Amino acid sequence: MSGYLARARRDLLDSGACHFLRAWTMKIASLQSDFYRIPLPVTLTDSRHGEMKGFELVTVRVRDADGAEGVGYTFTPGTGAAGAYALIKSDLTGILIGQDADCIEQLWQKMWWHVHYAGRGGSMSFAISAIDMSLWDLKARRAKTPLWKLLGGHDPKVPCYAGGIDLYFSIDQLLRQTDDNLKKGFRAIKMKVGRKKLSEDVERVRAMRQHLGEDFALMVDANMGWTVDQAIAAARAFAPFNLTWIEEPTIPDDVAGHARIVQQGGAPIAAGENLHSLWEFKQYIASGAVTYPEPDVTNCGGITSFMKIAHLAESFNLPVTSHGAHDVTVHLLAAAPNRAYLEAHGFGLERYISQALRIEEGCAIAPNDPGHGIVFDWNALSALIVK
């Protein structure tokens, strides 16, 4: 279409004079997905994944017939993203072309049931998450409003913690990293636990508490490294250190075990980064197995599911936190009145996006740019594409 006709059509849309033309331009014209392997500047470690030298990234760019674009993504810590990429390419793109981009709930249900038999989680939820994120970004950009306002708008200042991936750092390294995070404006910090000896974890947590002071928000993350009984013992051993929460104490499949840890360990429990649907969160919350539900927008089914999980938690009077994708999730927690802390994640995309997360006095500030505000450096990413 010529530039003149495109401008004329946009003028008609802006004037509100041509409803049938507006409906036409809402249709999804194209969906592009790409797969990258991203090296990390520092090797990261935890109790379950071992050493992580990089992560995998899948991006989605959805465009409507007027040329407007929305961007979404998902990621994995080193392996597994190829499955989500394949699902997007082979199974999901075809059923979305020509559909109304504004009907996001309808499209979410269409995707879910299209691959339901082979999924109900896993790669399916990662794939849907990336597409769903791109659709919400497109909708907010078309509305010329920031995503957090489109989702309801509560408070753009979201309490935020620095999520360290540092299980095998020495105590000196751990404290140096902590001081660096304090200089960046963080007023809450999470560290890894789950070493082979509980005494080593206790020593490291004690050092952090002494370094930070009694009232500083300190969380620990075991990355599913314990049995239920080990987790209860650890929670009791950490009791003198006044932790905000213990995260992922055992495997996500053991809902009853998490409930035992909550009841017998005496510490708040955060969990959910490995739960991939609203219904899994419902089981945890209704069973009293979690204190801080912790969805990840890149694997729980996207923004559509994340907000449902946040509202479900609110109905149980529980605070909601987050895992990963802090550049997008800041918008979601800014729209949730029961938000607790946003995680500033170690797998940040700062090297490949135009605008890093803004931290002020312990809070992340949700941007006021239209959409989620992420602008990828596609040229820099192009050298890392998997073909």
Image (cartoon, rainbow, N blue to C red):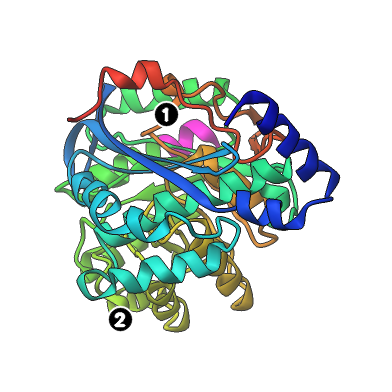
Which comes sooner in the sequence, label 1 or label 2? 2
Q: Position of residue 179 (x, y in %)?
A: 48, 22
Q: Does residue 56 sit above or below 274 in this rendering?
A: above
Task: Using a 10 Å C-alpha cutoff, classify the residue at mark 1 as few (fewer than 14 neighbours), some (14 to 19) or many (20 or more).
Answer: some
| Secondary structure, magenta segment, majority class | helix
Say which residue appears at 54% left-offset and 25% top-offset. Answer: 356
- Report the residue marked by disc 2: 256
- Is residue 243 visible to the viewer in this orientation of the structure? no
Q: Does residue 290 sit above or below 17 in this rendering?
A: below
Quadrant for the N terminus, please.
Answer: top right
Q: Is residue 273 left or right of residue 327?
A: left
- Report the residue marked by disc 1: 349
Q: In front here: 237 or 27?
A: 27
Q: Quadrant of residue 381?
A: top left
Q: Label 2: state its secondary structure.
A: helix
Q: In front here: 276 or 83?
A: 83
Distance from Cα at disc 1 to Cα at disc 2? 36 Å
Q: Position of residue 121 (x, y in %)?
A: 29, 66
